[in-house]
Image (cartoon, rainbow, N blue to C red):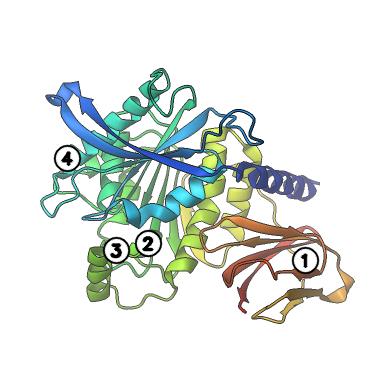
């Protein structure tokens, strides 16, 4: 009975997820001033659901939770386009804090910038001259990659947010572990097992171990890299090429794995979707792409996979993809996820028309009975 209920909740979440992916992305730049630091200028690039004019069919419903994003060492706004294009359409505001981008970055100031931005964006809700006027939800998250991951960790010790998520977080040029012990929010640390830029044993694991969160996860992406969470960046890739020697997946695959967990986590923590929590936990317990640890008091997830054999053909697919389930078991649904983790197609038939899907690599999530199987599918012309 619990397994059936879990399946129903997962399907409900995925339906809601599809609805949430209706927003186009708008962006705007703004310079804020932090009065507590001698009016320090804090530049930000804000990405938010597109506001349509009256009489157009799609309207912004809002308000939208806020995700403040910290960048890696000498990595600019373009490197994280995959985050904006994936997260904002699902009904979130993403704020890229565009300071300390030089080789002489002040790590402590950057952590302060991230903490400051949480409150600054909340205040925009009441600013009638702001593009965010009236659409800012009171729930926020801090996230960061590499240097930004370490800075987001320190920032989370200074301000209240719903969750902290870091990707290959780096120990900074000042004490990072003591502030980590003061973080109380639920947290995730993403770690690539083949990261040679910030080796997990030296950076990710100490940060995870020292987090004071009552609920924290470390998600280890098997064969994963340091830079692959983001788009290609010259300096990051240069460092990766000279230090990470055994990367086993490509950038698109790592991003798809990351957003598989990140999307459901945000929907749970920032939108209160308990079905999304079940999806997150189910994916965590069944994925062959990651290993994980946590100290959380999670609700019980019962997963009793049946013995299922299936084939997908042809693969690569051109116009039609056939899914054959052996032993006469019934296929309930198949979902196709793009490389950035977005749901692009849902079908309830064994023969799926893929002629209008862009060529590339996809993950097909196939629901059979009370079990779920994930297959990699290549679509090409």
On screen, residue 248 above or below 217:
below
- Distance between the alpha carbons at the discs numbered 3 and 4: 23 Å
Question: Which quarter of the image is occupied by the C terminus?
Answer: bottom right
Marker disc for residue 231: 2
Gap in angstroms between the C-alphas marked 4 and 1: 52 Å
Q: CA distance from mark 1 to mark 3?
A: 43 Å
Q: Secondary structure at mark 1?
A: loop
At 61% from the left edge and 32% from the top edge, which residue is drawn?
A: 59
Q: Is residue 57 visible?
A: yes
Structural crowding at the residue carrying mark 4, measured as other residues with C-alpha within 10 Å and reported as few (<14), some (14–19) or many (≥20):
some
Above or below, 127 relative to 149:
above
Counting from the top left corner in percent of width and height, residue 24 is at 54, 44
Looking at the rendered structure, which numbered label has been put on residue 233? 3
Element marked by disc 3:
loop
Residue beneath disc 4: 108
Q: Give the x, y percent position of residue 360.
A: 56, 72
Task: Report the side of 17 relative to 72 (left or right).
Answer: right
Which is closer to the viewer, label 3 or label 4? 3
Few, some or many C-alpha atoms within 10 Å of disc 1 (few <14, some 14-19, many ≥20)?
Answer: few
Q: Residue at x 29, y 49 (%)?
A: 71
Residue closest to the eye, 115 or 204: 115
Identify the residue position indicated by label 1 in the image. Answer: 306
**Earlier-in-chain disc, 3 versus 4:** 4
Answer whether labels 2 and 3 touch (C-beta < 8 Å).
yes
Q: How many marks?
A: 4
């Amino acid at each position: 009975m619990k397994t059936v209920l879990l399946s129903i909740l997962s399907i409900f979440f995925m339906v809601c997820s599809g609805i949430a992916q209706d927003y186009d992305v708008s962006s705007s730049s703004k310079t804020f001033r932090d009065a507590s630091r001698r009016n320090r200028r804090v530049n930000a690039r804000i990405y938010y659901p597109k506001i349509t004019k009256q009489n157009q069919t799609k309207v912004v419903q809002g308000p939208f939770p806020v995700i403040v994003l910290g960048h890696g060492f000498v990595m600019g706004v373009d490197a994280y386009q995959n985050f904006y294009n994936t997260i904002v359409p699902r009904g979130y505001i993403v704020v890229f804090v565009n300071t300390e981008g030089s080789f002489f970055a002040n790590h402590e100031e950057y952590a302060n910038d991230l903490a400051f931005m949480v409150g600054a964006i909340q205040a925009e809700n009441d600013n009638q001259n702001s593009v965010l006027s009236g659409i800012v939800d009171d729930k926020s998250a801090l996230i960061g990659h590499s240097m930004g991951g370490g800075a987001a960790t320190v920032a989370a010790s200074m301000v209240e947010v719903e969750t902290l998520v870091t990707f290959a977080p780096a120990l900074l040029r000042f004490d990072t572990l003591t502030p980590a012990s003061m973080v109380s929010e639920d947290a995730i640390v993403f770690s690539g097992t083949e990261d040679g830029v910030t080796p997990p044993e030296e950076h990710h694991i100490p940060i995870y171990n020292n987090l004071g969160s009552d609920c924290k996860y470390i998600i280890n992406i098997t064969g994963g890299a340091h830079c692959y969470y983001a788009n290609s960046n010259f300096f990051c890739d240069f460092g990766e090429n000279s230090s990470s020697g055994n990367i086993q997946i490509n950038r698109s695959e790592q991003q798809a794995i990351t957003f598989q967990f990140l999307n459901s986590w945000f929907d749970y923590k920032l939108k209160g979707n308990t079905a999304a929590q079940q999806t997150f936990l189910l994916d965590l317990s069944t994925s062959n792409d990651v290993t994980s640890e946590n100290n959380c008091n999670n609700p019980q997830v019962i997963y009793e996979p049946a013995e299922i054999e299936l084939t997908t053909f042809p693969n690569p697919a051109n116009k039609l993809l056939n899914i054959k389930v052996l032993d006469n078991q019934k296929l309930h649904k198949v979902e196709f996820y793009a490389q950035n983790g977005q749901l692009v197609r849902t079908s309830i038939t064994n023969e799926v028309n893929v002629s209008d899907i862009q060529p590339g690599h996809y993950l097909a999530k196939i629901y059979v009975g009370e079990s779920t199987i994930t297959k990699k599918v290549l679509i090409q012309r």
